[in-house]
Amino acid sequence: MSWGADFTGLNILSQLAADLHSKTQRLVEQVGLEVADEARRQILEGSPSGRIYSRDGSTWQASAPGEAPASPTGELVESISVDESGLSGLEVDVVAGGPAAFLELGTVNMAARPFLIPAVQVVEERIPDIAGGIFEPN
């Protein structure tokens, strides 16, 4: 008498798990890219209503507390990047250089000019649509 077992179901589960991981990784990457784009958009398309400054013949208007920061030189916008180097592949860091943390959170002497948290909030509402495009049946 012989006895056996069919493990083809486990192979299918393994393939499904790999596909799910790959699609989830794409979703996380896409959300990170969209957060970075939204942060840039908020800075570039914002209408600063703060103080007006003049220096060396140049004049610009700063952002007011609570507004996305003004970026007269473009440095802040250029510093926004997405780091996809997480070990699991399921994490993405959206980072900005220079004074970004001070602008985002404020300091003892300056009220916050947030742009990353509001960008996350905007993109968060779009996640179901983003996921729908990625997890759509083939």
Image (cartoon, grey):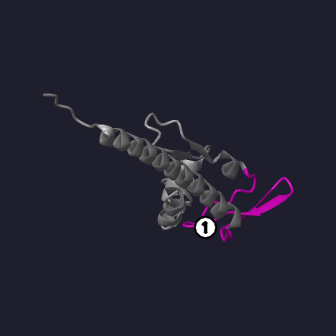
Residue at (63, 48) in percent of width and height: 80
**Image position, residue 82 (x, y; %):** 58, 45
Determine whether 19 is above or below 55 in the image: above
Residue at (74, 56) in percent of width and height: 72
Nearest to the observer: residue 126 or residue 112: 126
Label 1 Cα neighbours within 10 Å, binned few <14 / some 14-19 / many ≥20: some
Residue at (26, 37) in percent of width and height: 6
Q: Is residue 71 magenta?
A: yes
What's the magenta bit mostly, secondary-structure-wise? loop
Which quadrant holds residue 110?
Answer: bottom right
Q: Pointer 1: what residue?
A: 64
Determine whether 62 is above or below 75 in the image: below
**Image position, residue 101 (x, y; %):** 53, 49
Pick out the residue farthest to the right.
57
Pick out the residue farthest to the top.
1
Region in magenta: 46-74
Q: Amino acid at mark 1?
A: Ala
**Image position, residue 122 (x, y; %):** 52, 66
- In this orientation, does residue 30 appear? yes
**Image position, residue 1 (x, y; %):** 12, 28
Residue at (40, 46) in percent of width and height: 16
Label 1, secondary structure: give it: loop
In this picture, residue 104 sits left or right of residue 17: right
Nearest to the observer: residue 34 or residue 97: 34
Q: Is residue 80 magenta?
A: no
Which quadrant holds residue 59?
Answer: bottom right
